[in-house]
Image: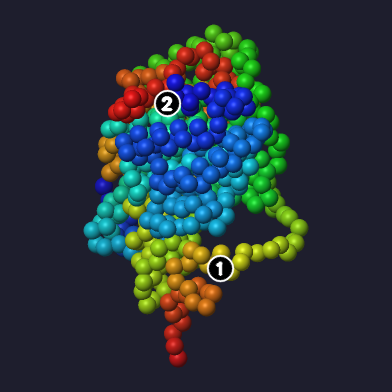
Amino acid sequence: MPLFEEGLVSLKEKIHKKEIKASDLVDEAYARIGKVDHQVKAFLTLNEEAAREDAKELDEKAAADTLLYGMPIGIKDNMVTKGLRTTCASHILDNYDPIFDATVIKKVKAAKSIMIGKLNMDEFAMGSSTENSSMAITRNPWDLDRVPGGSSGGSAAAVASGEVLFALGTDTGGSIRQPSAFCGVVGMKPTYGRVSRFGVVAFASSLDQVGPITRTVEDNAYLMETIAGLDPYDETSADVPVPHYSAALTGDIKGLRVAVPKEYLGEGIDEAIKDKIKDAVRQLEALGAVCEEVSLPHSRYAVPAYYIIASSEASANLARFDGVRYGERAESKDLIEMYKKSRSQGFGDEVKRRIMLGTFALSSGYYDAYYKKAQQARTLIKQDFEKVLENHDIIVGPTTPTTAFKIGEKVDDPLTMYANDLLTIPVNLAGVPAISLPCGLADGLPVGLQMIGRPFGEETLYRAAHAYEQTAGFKLAPTAIKGAND
Amino acid sequence: MVSRISEEQVKYVANLARLSFDDEEIKKFTTQLGDIIGFAEQLNELDTEGVEPTTHVLDMYNVMRDDVVEPSLPREEALKNAPVQEDGQVKVPQIMEAD
């Protein structure tokens, strides 16, 4: 059995008993990458030499005494890693060599996780399919003609195809949960402020969060308790104690009050997905949860509000890419021309589209009509969640309206692509946490079950997700990769 | 349907955003941005009279720290990624007219 089919707890136990070494795990990661990554193309940059050295150092130690000791991790390429190229899958950062580690990177390194490499994504995290990467097309390990989702498509595909034990992604409008759903893995978008954003290349600062992508809920809880917490370098990180999420996995959800929004099982959601979600709700009931239909009446305004807000913030955040202090510079005798040329050559189409939309929405004469209106809609969407979560512990529904779509199917039609995120976007606007976990297959492709919680209610989400997972009997087995099981 | 944004407006916004496009791209962006803006106008169905805009989801206000001098980055490190430099500084094209 491949080692990564075992969870972190079992692998750490084996290291502790000296049945395996950290180097064996790192060997397995690179062997697997050698075998399957030419098909999946999840990785942009490998950290092989340093990873093998780090593993050797751990091999010689007496005890596996840290939370993630020797566990191979992949990192989405929008988190800066000292001395390891960080590109955001954009040509403008082709050769960017960071001079510091993001706080989340420092934390996983301190927990002795071993960084295997950097993972593909939609350029600057703008997209839902990883097709907007200017570096490579990542493929879904369940069907290589399909997208892995996005923007953390490389992270989800690498975990699903067994190249790493787990990965970090970021989620601004669904970018952890949607690819996790498409690839049949577990992804958590924490409460806004739960995890530091320091050293994470900003897309939309009021929405962005880092979170774990793993094969199991338990592994997710361990990685989450490693990365969460207050950071003096990020003033939006929250001063709220970090629980031991792994201790919340009791299997007991008797009396848990579960809300099922009718909007999440309505128009625009595939029938096969609805069926799987209804099955999951029945299973939660069988486990003792009390499920009730509710309404989140402003759900349909989330996508338009999001595209105005996220693009506006992006247009400001991406102003820093001007060819002066870092990134690619196009030569010109005139400063303004130099900015324009550098940016126009360095950014891809989707990034330009969002910068343009955001600049328009913030420009004089349009600010009130678009940006302010969208922020008011955001308030109404947030209030919908507050109302439902007053009387319910969690909200349950699908993560995505469809299973993974074909490569090329939506890439030329921005609005259809955006609509794919209608079930994940409201969560970012409200700032609440949500987890996506597999709840079966529809036509051979994974379906994601989304559980949404109260602010800083990640513990409850982990408990509910774990109780469901333990009884669902879903086995992760991506089948499309040729030669993967030789 | 009349587009919600004209080619002239797209050119104006492109200049604000420090981006440049050729004629074909201007046409494409005019259509696409018009569609997206039209889509966003669904928000006009909402009665937002008296609704406070949300700029930030957490109840936080002016997070302060003590103003203490700490070591800063060595100059070499800070300049490591600058594409053009001279004498330990970032070099840019001329920004002022010569007299």
Q: Tell which residue pokes out farthest to the top in this image.
A: A286
Q: Quadrant of the C terminus of chain A?
A: top left
Left/right of residue B72 with respect to residue A152 in the rendered view = right
Quadrant location, the N terminus of chain A: top left
Q: Which residue is mark 1?
A: B76
Q: Position of residue B41 (x, y in %)?
A: 40, 44
Residue A164: give x, y in percent of width and height. 47, 34
Q: Nearer the viewer, residue A95 or B19?
A: A95
Amino acid beneath label 2: Gly
Please give the name of the residue rendered at 57% of the width and 55% of the height, measured from the top-left corner: A100
Q: Determine whether A278 is above or below A245 in the image.
A: above
Q: How many angstroms separate mark 2 from mark 1 (CA)?
A: 45 Å
One can see residue A246 in this view: yes
Q: Nearer the viewer, residue A204 or A482?
A: A482
Image coordinates for residue A271, horizontal then vertical, percent = 35, 19
Judge whether A326 appears above or below A191 on screen. Answer: below
The amino acid type of the residue labelled 1 equals: Glu
Looking at this view, name the residue that lies furthest to the left.
B24
B5 is higher (above) or lower (below) than B74: above
Residue A184 tag number: 2
Q: Chain of mark 1?
A: B
Pick whichever, B66 or A389, lies toward us: B66
Residue drawn at (56%, 68%), measured in percent from left and top?
B76
**Label 1 SS:** helix
The disc placed on residue A297 is: none
Q: Residues within 10 Å of mark 2 (few under 14, many from 20)?
A: many
Which of the 4 image quadrants contains residue A179?
Answer: top left
**For numbered disc 2, what is the local secondary structure?**
loop
